[in-house]
Amino acid sequence: MSYLPTLIQTELLRVFVDMANAGRKRGIIPAFFDQRPANFDKRLAAENDIYILMRQRQDVDIARYKKYAGTDLAEQSKTFANGEGIIITPEAVPFVARFYKRKSKHVSTTPKAEAAMKRFGTDREREQVPSAQSAQAPSTRYQSARSKEVGTPVLMRRHKLTRPSTASTEVEHRASSTERQFDSAPVQEPVQSARQEARFTIEQEAEFIRRYKACGSIREAILGMHLGYGRYQKHASHIVRERNLRRTG
């Protein structure tokens, strides 16, 4: 970012640090990679739970390793082979491990931003997610309907002295009339349910669990949070079944 003005660099760094500090409750779990541990921002390093320290030989990098893994493992990192590194768990227990090349096939998919919005977003943000997806749905159905009904047009070479046959003229007329019919037909918008189901945020979920353990009623717990029972009842029932909640008060 050296080519950017200082003010823009400062603002970008501030937003990046805010994302690292408050991103988890929004479903964003960052992973940071840096070749030089000495250049890594300490504000970002403080938010990490798992550290993987690979081979380093510079004095400033070894000094940073000593703060995380101790003097012995830091000095040992100078002689690490390819794939060897120090792993520090959330319990602050460092140990040496070796990473091998993956042989199994990676079949999972990367979560999209829409999934995080549905899980951790506000009610207004959740309502905007399906509307953005449904805006493209009519055009997709319209194109697929035309492709099935009309088909791909075929170009035929015809001699300039021969007259067009009656059969080919009728086929062209039917195709053009069908195209005009689809062009003039209005595209129906998808009917959305007026009553959309909602999901708790992390703070709301914790508050619901506390209230449910106190009263033992899903309805009373939701209404006590001043939320709509009909919108949150399904998600609340799922939480009770998944966590096997019982009344403790």
Image (cartoon, rainbow, N blue to C red):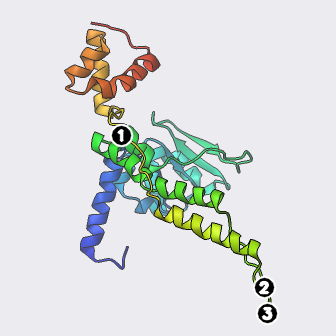
Q: Residues within 10 Å of mark 2 (few under 14, many from 20)?
A: few
Q: Earlier in the sequence, mark 3 or mark 1?
A: 1
91 or 147, nearer to the observer? 147
Residue 238: x %, y % from top left: 43, 22
Spatial separation of the CA atoms under disc 1 and disc 2: 63 Å
Q: Is residue 247 left or right of residue 152?
A: left
67 or 224, nearer to the observer? 224
Q: Residue at the spot x=25%, y=27% of the render?
A: 228
Amino acid on which disc 2 is placed:
Arg
Residue underneath mark 1: 120
Quarter of the image holding residue 63?
bottom left
Q: Residues within 10 Å of mark 1 (few under 14, many from 20)?
A: many
Spatial separation of the CA atoms under disc 3 and disc 1: 70 Å
113 or 219, nearer to the observer? 219
Q: Secondary structure at mark 1?
A: helix
Q: Secondary structure at mark 2?
A: loop
Spatial separation of the CA atoms under disc 3 and disc 2: 9 Å
Residue underneath mark 3: 161
Quarter of the image for the N terminus: give it. Answer: bottom left
The residue positioned farthest toward the bottom in the image shown: 161
Q: Is residue 134 left or right of residue 77?
A: left
Residue 112: x %, y % from top left: 48, 49
Q: Secondary structure at mark 3?
A: loop
Q: Residues within 10 Å of mark 3 (few under 14, many from 20)?
A: few
Q: How many marks?
A: 3
156 or 224, nearer to the observer? 156
Residue 113: x %, y % from top left: 43, 50
Q: Is residue 199 left or right of residue 174?
A: left
Amino acid on which disc 3 is placed:
Leu
Residue underneath mark 2: 158
